[in-house]
Image (cartoon, rainbow, N blue to C red):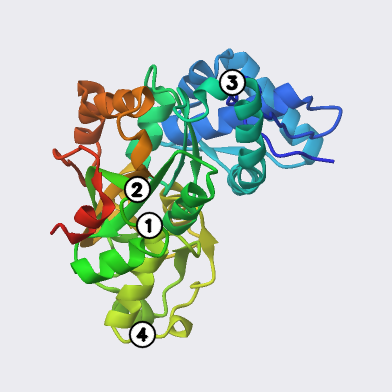
Amino acid sequence: MPKTATSTATTTGGIRWNWDLGPAFPPADAACLLDLLLALRELGTLGKAAAATGISYRGAWGLLRRCEDTFGHNPVRKERGRGTQLSDFGEKLLALDQVARAALADVHAPWTQRLQDVLFPEHSHAPEHLRIAASHDLALADWIENGRHTGVDLFWRGSEEALAALVRGDCEVAGFHLPDDWPAEQATAWLGRWLKPRQYVCLPVMRRQHGLLTAPGNPLGIASLADVARLGLRLVNRQRGSGTRSMIDQLLAANRLDARDIPGYAHEEFTHDAVAATIAGGHADVGFGIEAAAARYDLGFVPLLRDRYCLALPAGLAHSPAITHLIRRFRGNTFRQRLRAMAGYEMLEDNEPVAWERLAAAE
């Protein structure tokens, strides 16, 4: 029976899982294949992907050929002028891995923490290795995956799911985002659904540009969701519970549009990358997400609104060594340089933990 996989090592005393793809793909090879496909999507060339995965170029092609021979589908395709790209089959493999990993992380996280509390009770209240449930973000993903000494286990959730996981004790930090155009009353009411006053603090990290992702050059002249409905264009949506989905629904309401007026409204993806990849692959005409995702896939982009990306955590951990180190990393040059290199990002300088009530009230 397949078990969901990630090649990322868990902390000592945690739970590990891997895909079982049959005799042709032992769990270690299955994890290596998924790592290779993810690196290929991120880096754009097989040579760079192989190097990032720690295997030879020849070994990478061997994995891909074995996948095609075993399952009858090639996870990649070669395109003139674009090198090696993921095929629909390859994208589906990665999407399945991501969804399964997220689902099992919810199940396993409480038991992992309980085991940690038994094995290392002296660290149970001030963990050295943080678990972060976070709304998907390209800059954060890039920093965690490529930075050194970040000391976190990161798993993607929608903003609402991340905050719920924090309150349940499934993680120490939750990543979420607030639209800039929300009035203080709306932001306070929304955060108050999960966070009790004086028990949690928030750390503002960055501001991001959101908008419509279109085909390269925006050939249809799309300027709003109203245009999407008027032209009958295929939308690729974000999953329920994500902050981005909330933005989409509010834009629909502002334009007096019914979701039934938007073809593809029920087509959900779990990350900004997946939305962009769907449009780049010709499976949708338009999506909603951050500008950096459009730039990564050479798509058109129509700016609509900005948001603040923040981290929430228990007030008792605000000055713990792990959180202090995390804040120092955010203030460092590495993160700032990565942010400056990505389209549509702006560093928020007031990156000190504050009471969430103050954050919600800030303009």
Q: Is residue 110 left or right of residue 319?
A: right
The answer to whether marks 2 and 1 mark residues whose Cβ atoms lie closer than 8 Å is yes
Q: Quadrant of the N terminus?
A: top right
Among numbered discs 1 and 3, the one appearing first in the sequence: 3
The secondary structure type at the circle numbered 3 is loop
Res 87 → quadrant: top right
- Residue placed under numbered mark 3 in the picture: 120
**Residue 255 visible to the viewer:** yes
The answer to whether marks 2 and 3 mark residues whose Cβ atoms lie closer than 8 Å is no
Q: What residue is rendered at 47% in x and 30% in y?
A: 125
Among numbered discs 4 and 2, the one appearing first in the sequence: 2
Q: Residue 71 at x, y = what percent? A: 78, 40
Task: Give the CA separation, mark 1 to mark 3.
Answer: 28 Å
Among numbered discs 4 and 3, the one appearing first in the sequence: 3
Among numbered discs 1 and 4, the one appearing first in the sequence: 1
Among numbered discs 2 and 3, the one appearing first in the sequence: 3
- Residue placed under numbered mark 1 in the picture: 196
The answer to whether marks 1 and 4 mark residues whose Cβ atoms lie closer than 8 Å is no
- Residue placed under numbered mark 2 in the picture: 200
User: 116 or 165: nearer the eye?
Assistant: 116
- Residue placed under numbered mark 4 in the picture: 257
Task: Give the CA separation, mark 1 to mark 4.
Answer: 34 Å
